[in-house]
Amino acid sequence: MSKLLLPVLTLLWLVSALHVQAQTNPRPLRLEEYQKAKAFQIKDLDADTYVKIENAYILDRYELRKPYFITGDDGLRKRMDLYRLLAKEGLQELGLMVFYTNEKGKRYQALLPNFTADGKVWEQYFEDIHAVDREEKNFVLKLSYILSKELAFQQYKVLNQGKDLKVESATYGNDICFPGTQEVALENGSKKLLKDILPGDRVVTVDPETKQATVTQVQELVAHEAKNYAITQLVVVAAQEKTGNTATEVLLSGKVLEATPNHPMLTRAGQKKIGEILEGEEVLCFNQKTRAYEPFTVLRKKEYAGGVQKVYNMVATEGTTFLMNGVMVLQK
């Protein structure tokens, strides 16, 4: 999943930016400050809630929140702490410092600038979080989940390096299909890349109403000619939280699905093309932790040109659904 979770993220203050300005006193974080602040440390994340640095900056625990302990699909438990970065003079807010501690005790940190920061600061931030993500699988997913919970507005929307799909040369026409790298769930519990599916393969189909899985046989794998297809990518999550006296424990399961924008899916609101599905909507997925088919929430949506490639679709003997990357999709 890590490869799919490394698109460039850009900050969109979609809701209540004016409300945020009213409650804080932000000023732009300069690039040289950003580079310096990345090295600011908190010695004791459990005890130090307000720390002065160089007599010029302050790290103030965000809303006095308890730390998050996040356990992902890999079973590894990570810790995440959030601190506001303030300039001491005027208590001007510069950004949000993220301390991320892995299961071995190694600490990573990232500095999320506030909305007034220059584009060069944001470019450096994107590079930094991607560097962490390369070492710590699904760091970006976990960060996005926590920020979407904690902040009163949507922090992230996944874009293709800030480009609008309309200016790309991609096309999808009437082809309703998936990139060949998507994984198909097979009867024996294994997975197979879509491009490698053969007639006779037995794949999982799920009844949308009963959430019971059965098996259907592939009749044909249809391959469409190589083009620069438009692709919609959904990042979906299911989370269970338990708040204790000292921390909030999160069991987080995430999946990524890619398809041409016109491929049909079922949501809680009914059948939609994947390109029409909105962040916050629910789709049915297989939860590896509970071994059940459950609703997952769309955390992020990205639309981009996928580059010249073939795309594929399966035709089966029966059933209306497939499991693609663990997400239930409809046959076209």
Image (cartoon, rainbow, N blue to C red):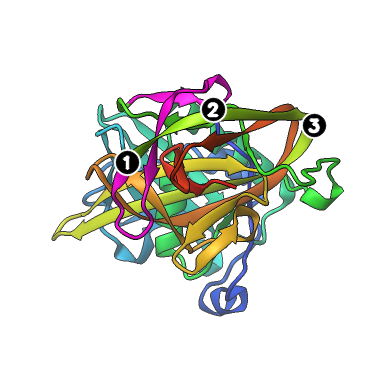
Looking at the rendered structure, the kind of residue marked 1 is: Thr
Q: Which residues are magenta?
A: 190-213
> Residue at coordinates 73% horizontally, 49% vertically from top-left?
119
Residue 227: image tag: 3
55 in relation to 309, above or below: below
> Residue at coordinates 25% horizontally, 27% vertically from top-left?
104
Q: Is residue 246 left or right of residue 275?
A: left
Mark 1 vs mark 3, foreground winner is: 1
Q: Position of residue 287 (x, y in %)?
A: 30, 44
Residue 179: image tag: none
Q: Position of residue 183 (x, y in %)?
A: 48, 30
Camera-nearest residue between 276 and 236: 276
124 in relation to 186, above or below: below
Camera-nearest residue between 241 and 195: 195
- Magenta includes 112? no
> Residue at coordinates 68% horizontally, 48% vertically from top-left?
303
Measured in 3D between alpha carbons, the distance from the residue under mark 1 to the one under mark 3, in whole angstroms, is 34 Å
Looking at the rendered structure, the kind of residue marked 3 is: Lys
Camera-nearest residue between 318 and 21: 318
Report the residue marked by disc 2.
194
Q: Is residue 302 left or right of residue 145?
A: right
Dot 3 crowding, Cα within 10 Å, few <14, some 14–19, many 20+: some
Q: Secondary structure at mark 3?
A: strand
- Mark yes or no: residue 121 visible: no
Dot 1 crowding, Cα within 10 Å, few <14, some 14–19, many 20+: few
Looking at the rendered structure, the kind of residue marked 2 is: Leu
Q: Position of residue 107 (x, y in %)?
A: 35, 33
